[in-house]
């Protein structure tokens, strides 16, 4: 591994991209620690204790709980991307843009940026109302000018995060948003470890208690290792569809006749269904956190019902999370993989699946396999994401900081594998041994 990194840094272009990506991450982490004017940082305690904000805080790398410049993190950009991808299917004009190649892609990216700024403004206003209504003593000044400054700072922070992510795509090693999410989750590891120790330390009042505490920590580490192995297995698994190419005579030479495979990955969607589902599930509870809790009457009853339903420990929330992960897995496959196009490309190149006629029968066959593979992959994703939530619910919410550990683990492992592949591809072109050897 060290030799591989050494070889990577021998390539000037690759070395420049890696160092640039690390520099962007450093800038992001500095911004995540910069205080915002009129915010009393010493009084901001308990903000991350609001259940749904724990997830948003993990995605923001702890900036949300400190109300710093990058408190909104990458959520406005992710939400904007989700909205535009949905509208691309619903609105014919956007669908035409998506099919116009590079020029259309640039226009869609521009629209995504504008939507990101609009969502950042909306989230900044809601976040300010949360600080003002539910966190007494945090605002040093609650006047109109102070409100405008705070909201403008959060909007600027979200726009800057979007710019940093795009810079990683342009001049770094790619996957800008994923890299920033990766850095944010890694930054939260010490607090997660402290949470685990906080649970284990309650048993350290006796010799037997120390044994139980050690066993508990070992069990947690063992489960994490098993889950990491499971995620890697899930990410690397694929269904190989055999493809045969017909022989063709061109001039005096014969071409074709080879056997190949069409690989369909078990987890072709990556972590996107997890991110989409988490964002949608967090919306109701986030809106509730931003409004003042009614003092009594029917309003309080409705508020309590919604608070119970959309708590991460409720059965309703877990079922909704499961259903959305599966639904978004199928949705993401529908917009990213076209069986008809694959079947047409095979037909043009003289390829066919043994026992299946070219054309529509081939596309139907690929669609049938893809549907089954997507379902299995989505169920695996849902299991890994929900398992820590179930463990937290069984433990009586004592492991609340680990409720989203499954989603975080999927993101971290997925981004690590994608980044390793990107570096591997560039090193392979220069005949270096890579990460995946």
Image (tube, helix red, strand yellow):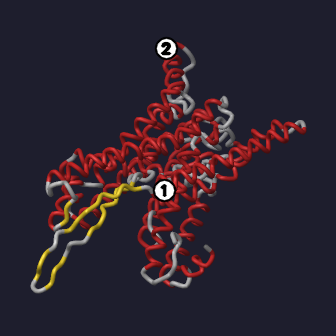
Residue 318 position within the rendered picture, expressed as x and y whole percent measured from the top left = 50, 32
* 156 vs 101, nearest the viewer: 101
* 41 vs 234, nearest the viewer: 234
In front: mark 1 or mark 2? 2
Establish if 172 lies above or below 93: below
Which quadrant holds residue 246? bottom left
Residue 243 position within the rendered picture, expressed as x and y whole percent measured from the top left = 25, 63
Question: What is the C-alpha distance between the residues marked 1 and 2?
Answer: 39 Å
* 170 vs 155, nearest the viewer: 170
Query: Is 145 left, or right, of 138 in this rendering?
Result: left
Residue 95 position within the rendered picture, expressed as x and y whole percent measured from the top left = 21, 53
Residue at (52% x, 16% y) in the render: 301
The earlier-in-sequence mark between 1 and 2 is: 1
Q: Quadrant of the N terminus?
A: bottom right
Establish if 14 lies above or below 28: below
Residue at (60% x, 80% y) in the render: 6
**To which residue does mark 1 refer?**
156
Checking the image for residue 298, the label placed there is 2
């Amino acid at each position: 591994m060290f030799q591989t990194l050494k070889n990577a840094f021998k390539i000037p272009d690759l070395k420049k991209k890696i160092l640039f990506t690390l520099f962007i991450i450093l800038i992001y982490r500095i911004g995540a620690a910069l205080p915002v004017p009129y915010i009393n940082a010493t009084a901001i305690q308990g903000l991350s204790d609001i259940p749904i904000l724990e997830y948003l805080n993990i995605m923001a790398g702890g900036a949300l709980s400190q109300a710093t410049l990058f408190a909104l993190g990458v959520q406005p950009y992710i939400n904007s991307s989700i909205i535009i991808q949905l509208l691309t299917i619903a609105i014919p004009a956007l669908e035409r843009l998506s099919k116009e190649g590079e020029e259309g892609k640039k226009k869609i990216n521009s629209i995504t940026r504008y939507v990101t700024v609009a969502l950042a403004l909306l989230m900044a206003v809601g976040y300010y109302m949360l600080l003002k209504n539910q966190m007494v003593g945090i605002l040093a000044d609650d006047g109109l000018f102070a409100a405008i400054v705070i909201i403008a700072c959060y909007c600027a922070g979200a726009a800057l995060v979007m710019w940093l992510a795009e810079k990683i795509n342009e001049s770094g090693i790619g996957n800008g948003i994923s890299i920033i999410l990766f850095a944010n989750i890694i930054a939260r590891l010490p607090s997660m470890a402290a949470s685990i120790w906080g649970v284990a330390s309650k048993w350290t009042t006796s010799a037997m208690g120390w044994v139980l505490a050690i066993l508990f920590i070992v069990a947690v580490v063992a489960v994490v290792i098993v889950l990491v192995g499971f995620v890697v297995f899930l990410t690397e698994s694929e269904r190989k569809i055999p493809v045969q190419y017909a022989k063709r005579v061109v001039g005096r030479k014969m071409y074709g006749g080879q056997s190949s495979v069409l690989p369909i990955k078990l987890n072709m969607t990556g972590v996107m269904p997890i991110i989409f589902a988490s964002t949608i599930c967090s919306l109701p509870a986030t809106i509730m956190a931003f409004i003042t809790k009614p003092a009594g009457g029917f309003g309080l009853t409705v508020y309590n019902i919604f608070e119970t339903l959309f708590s991460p420990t409720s059965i309703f929330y877990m079922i909704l999370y499961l259903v959305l992960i599966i639904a978004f897995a199928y949705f993401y496959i529908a917009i990213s993989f076209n069986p008809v196009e694959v079947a047409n490309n095979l037909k043009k190149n003289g390829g066919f699946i043994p026992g299946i006629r070219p054309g529509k029968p081939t596309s139907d066959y690929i669609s049938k396999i893809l549907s089954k593979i997507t379902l299995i992959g989505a169920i695996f994703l849902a299991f890994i994401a929900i398992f820590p939530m179930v463990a937290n619910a069984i433990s009586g919410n004592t492991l609340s900081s680990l409720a989203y550990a499954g989603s975080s683990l999927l993101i971290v492992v997925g981004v690590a594998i994608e980044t390793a592949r990107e570096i591997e591809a560039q090193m392979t072109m220069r005949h270096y041994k890579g990460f995946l050897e």
